Image (spheres, helix red, strand yellow):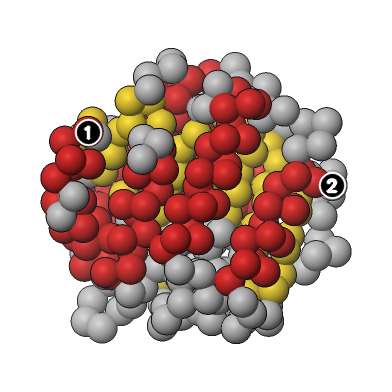
Amino acid sequence: MKVAYISHADCGRHDTGWRHPEHVGRLRAIPRALREDVELYHALEHVEGRHATIEDIALGHDRAYVDRVRRLSESGGGALDADTIVSEGSWDAARAAVGCVLDAVDRAIDGEARSFCAVRPPGHHALPDRGMGFCLFGNVALGAHHARQRRGVDRVLIVDWDVHHGNGTQAMVEHDPSIRFVSMHQSPWYPGTGAATDRGPLGSIWNVPMPGGLPATRYVEALQGAVEDATRGFTPGLVMVSAGFDCLAGDPLGEFTLEVEHIAALATWLLDKAEGWCGGRMLASLEGGYAPDRVGAASVAVMRAMLGR
Ligand SMILES: [Zn+2]
């Protein structure tokens, strides 16, 4: 099976300003790390994703909010909250980020490839009617709805290993029982949601709050346990990973202790599961991760796992 590296030049045009942790350097670190592994670089299919349409984004967001982001961007930009910025290039960046994930979904369903989406702005905090936590649109949640509503996938599993709770993804998928969402995150920590008792209105949400500073294997085992629970009697037709690399040791915005080797092991484990469930239909999309070199190394590890290397 081919492995696609999907990105879009417009993702670099989301300008968060001086000294914001979510900056374009995070994204640039990925091709930089890829080029250090020439064999891997050439084994990948390099794809420029599409721009999502307003219809695509409205699969999970209120049109009034989508319009607000577009107008704010077109008028030169502004702030949605203290740390969520819209710049002149953000509309194009945000719809490219969504579009790359939609492309990855289509490729997985058409049996062509596993994909890694190197995109920004990230998406898992974006609520249906409001951006927050550096996120404008719910890239992965929108991809799940695209798979369900337009591509005939019966069941989707989303696994979120970003150090923060994927509150936006939860809000956007918790009313669809055919999408199950597993989020492991530091607690107490931003954004403050994601208690283990919060299973969503339909019981389709698995939240795994964890303290920071534990041995890395504890996080790996906790996430694997939750995925096992979530897939008992539920065979996914597509596996989507919200790959936040702020779960790595030393990240400035998290206190988890994972190393790149743990990310590789988790990706390999999930791929093996996906092989059994749905012929290996799986994609990963970048969420957080604020130490650029670590983001690059971990992204490469996921792509290597996808290639079975
Ligand atoms: Zn995060």
| Residue 162: x %, y % from top left | 52, 63
Tell me the kind of residue under disc 1: Ala
Q: Is mark 2 within 8 Å of ligand 1?
A: no
Could you tell me which secondary element the residue under label 1 belongs to? helix
| Residue where numbered disc 1 is placed | 43
Image mark for residue 171: none
Q: Quadrant of the N terminus?
A: top left
Q: Label 1 to label 2, Cα distance in Å?
A: 40 Å
Q: How crowded is mark 1: few (under 14 residues within 10 Å), some or many (20 or more)?
A: few
Query: Of residues 266 and 96, which is closer to you in this image?
Result: 266
| Residue 182: x %, y % from top left | 68, 51
| Residue where numbered disc 2 is placed | 203
Image quarter of residue 95: top left
| Residue 113: x %, y % from top left | 38, 25
- Residue at 77 percent of width and 68 percent of height: 195
Q: Can residue 120 be seen in this view?
A: yes
| Residue 42: x %, y % from top left | 16, 36
